[in-house]
Amino acid sequence: MRIRITLLLLLGALAASPAFAQDYPRRAVRLVVTSAAGSGIDIAARLVGQQLAETWGQPVVVDNRVGASGQIGGAMVARSSPDGYTLLVVSPVFVISEALYPKLPYSFRSDFAPIARVGRTPYVMAVSPSVPAATLADYVAFVKARPGQSHYGSNGNGTIMHLAGELFKSTAGVDIVHVPYKESPRVLGDVIGGRVEMMFNSVTLLAPPAQSGKLRALAIASGKRSALMPELRTFAEGGYPAIQVESWYGIVAPAKTPANVVAKLQKDIAAAANTQAVRERLVAMGTEPLAETAAGFGATIKSELDRYARVIKSAGITVE
C-alpha cells in the first residue's frame, strides 16, 4: 500500500510539473542578455527571441543585465526557478570567467543546463600595415627575430582577445608583449596607426578595415574560412591547427530544468535560428548559424572551459 501511494504521489507531482505540460510556454519567457543593447549577442538574442515569440504565441522578453563580466545576469538566472521561463544567453565570457574568478556567485559547470548554441563568429589576427609581414609565416619569423620587442593589443586582461594572443604566443613559440586597453575601437585605432603591431578580434570588426587596406589580416582562427573573408587562410592552413578562437552565442537554463522542457527549447530555438530571416541577418554579421543539440553544446562548453583554463594557468593571467 505504501509503495502504491508513493507511486501515485510521484505521478501526480510529475503531471503537475512543467516537464509534462503540453502547452509550454503558457506565459512570457525571459531571455537574459549580459551585454548592452545593440551588441552582437543582443542582436542575435532578439532575432531568435522574435522567432520564438511567433512560434509560441507568447512574448519573449530580452532583459539586458550588464556588468561584472556577466556575473549579475548569470547569478540571477542561476537562482531562478528551473521551469523554462528564465533563460540566459551565454558567450565565451562565461567559460573564461570560470577560470579567472575564484569566487563566482554560481558555477558555470554545474548551475546551468545547456540548451542550444545558435551561432559562432571566428576571430582574426591582423597587423598594422607598417609590419613587414605579408603572411602568417612572415609575421612569426619577424617576431622571433625580435623577441620581446613586438606588441599586441586587447580590450583588457582576461578577455577573449587577450587569451587569443596568449594562445598564439604559446603555440607559435614567440615572445610578444600584451598591451591591455579598455575597448576594442581604441585597440583597432592604434593597430591601424602603427602604435601597436597586432590584435585579435572578430571577423565582423576586422573585415572592413582589412579589405580597405587599413590593416593586414594574416589568418582566421577557425576550422574553416569565413564567408566575410573567403580569401583569408585559417591558422590550420598556416600550420597552427590548435589556434581556434571564436565568439559564440548559446542559451542555457537553470540546472534541474526538466529534460523535456530543455528538449522542446532546443528544438524550437534551433528552428528559430535556422529560419531564412535569422540566418541572413546572422551571416551578414559574420556569424555562422548553428543548430547544436543540448548534448553538443554541453560538450562545447566543457571543451572551452578546459581549454581556456589551461591558457589562463599557463600564461599566469589574473584580474583584479
Image (spheres, helix red, strand yellow):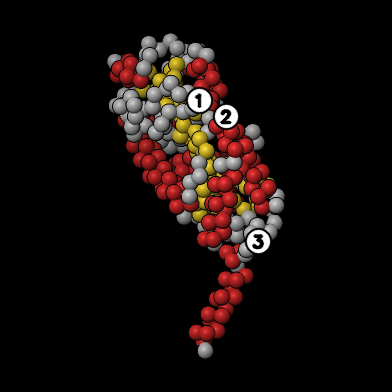
Q: Residue at x 54, y 19 (%)?
A: 208
Residue 23 is marked as 3
Q: Amino acid at mark 2?
A: Ala
Q: Residue at x 62, y 70 (%)?
A: 16
SS label for mark 1:
loop
Residue marked by disc 1: 228
Q: CA distance from mark 3 to mark 2?
A: 35 Å
Q: Residue at x 59, y 66 (%)?
A: 20
Camera-side residue of 158 and 225: 225
Vertical relation: 276 (above or below) 139: below
How far from the left and from the top, in percent, is residue 41?
58, 37
Q: CA distance from mark 2 to mark 1?
A: 8 Å
Q: Amino acid at mark 3?
A: Asp
**Camera sees residue 163:** no
Labels 2 and 1: the sequence-earlier one: 1
Residue 117 is marked as none
SS label for mark 3:
loop
Residue marked by disc 2: 284
How far from the left and from the top, in percent, is residue 62?
66, 44
Vertical relation: 129 (above or below) 11: above
Q: Amino acid at mark 1?
A: Leu
Labels 3 and 2: the sequence-earlier one: 3
**Camera sees residue 255:** yes
How far from the left and from the top, in percent, is residue 302?
41, 48
Labels 3 and 1: the sequence-earlier one: 3
SS label for mark 2:
helix
**Quarter holding residue 131:** top left
- Name, please, the residue furthest toward the front: 276
Q: Are marks 2 and 1 in contact (CB under 8 Å)?
A: no
